Image (cartoon, helix red, strand yellow):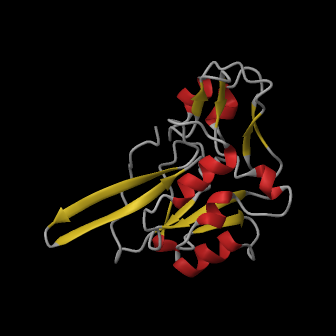
């Protein structure tokens, strides 16, 4: 079984927003909408012991995605390799999936009257390329691949970081697969970061 997802190294992320811009450009995301949004977490602590990190928020590619469960038309679906997609031809713009997503990772395109989200650039994957955000990251903080493949970029990044330094956003029974690497020397992981929207 395959599970394509992202691993993001927050020790390396500089908050430059290159991933956010590349995503908008590659996917023609309208102004005011985001598939990928860089959030500043902090600053925290007291001077001189201040720490902060940047959290690129994206679809968490859940194994038990609530957005898929509530979709009345089947427009939101899970692929064989674990990705969560939207068939825009089936989407009726009811926004139930937006309400169901605990991370605020979906957005409504008012012009097209459909819900949209990160697709991990499936159109680029189809020609053997990585998602635009991964390619654009100047800090090499983003990894893409199959979590179930021990030789993939994501699996190697997780192994190298060590289990105690690998985090995920809160699990509400939906089993998010995106992982974040953050060592205590950089900052303290916040268990309940703000939503993307």
Residue 11 visible in the snapshot: yes
158 horizontally vs 149: left or right: left
Q: Residue at x 54, y 42 (%)?
A: 34
Q: Residue at x 47, y 49 (%)?
A: 170
Q: Nearer the viewer, residue 11 or 169?
A: 11
Q: Is residue 14 above or below residue 68?
A: below
Q: Position of residue 189 (x, y in %)?
A: 37, 62
Q: Position of residue 184 (x, y in %)?
A: 35, 74
Return the residue found at the far bottom: 160
Q: Nearer the viewer, residue 175 or 193?
A: 193
Q: Quadrant of the N terminus?
A: bottom right
Q: Position of residue 147 (x, y in %)?
A: 70, 64
Q: How many marks?
A: 0
Q: Is residue 21 above or below residue 87?
A: below
Q: Residue at x 80, y 50 (%)?
A: 123
Q: Nearer the viewer, residue 184 or 18?
A: 18
């Amino acid at each position: 079984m395959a599970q394509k997802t992202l691993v993001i190294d927050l020790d390396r992320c500089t908050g430059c927003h290159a991933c956010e811009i590349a995503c908008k450009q590659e996917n023609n995301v309208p102004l005011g909408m985001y598939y990928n949004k860089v959030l500043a977490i902090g600053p925290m602590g007291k001077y001189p012991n201040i720490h902060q990190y940047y959290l690129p928020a994206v679809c968490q590619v859940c194994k038990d995605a609530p957005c898929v469960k509530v979709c009345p038309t089947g427009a939101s679906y899970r692929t064989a390799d674990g990705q969560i997609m939207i068939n825009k031809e089936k989407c009726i713009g009811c926004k139930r999936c937006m309400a169901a997503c605990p991370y605020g990772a979906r957005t409504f395109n008012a012009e097209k009257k459909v819900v949209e989200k990160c697709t991990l650039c499936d159109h680029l994957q189809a020609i053997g390329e990585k998602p635009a955000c991964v390619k654009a990251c100047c800090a090499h903080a983003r990894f893409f691949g199959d979590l179930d493949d021990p030789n993939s970029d994501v699996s190697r990044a997780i192994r190298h970081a060590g289990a105690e330094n690998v985090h995920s956003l809160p699990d509400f029974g939906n089993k998010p697969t995106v992982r974040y690497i953050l060592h205590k020397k950089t900052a303290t992981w916040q268990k309940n970061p703000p939503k993307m929207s």
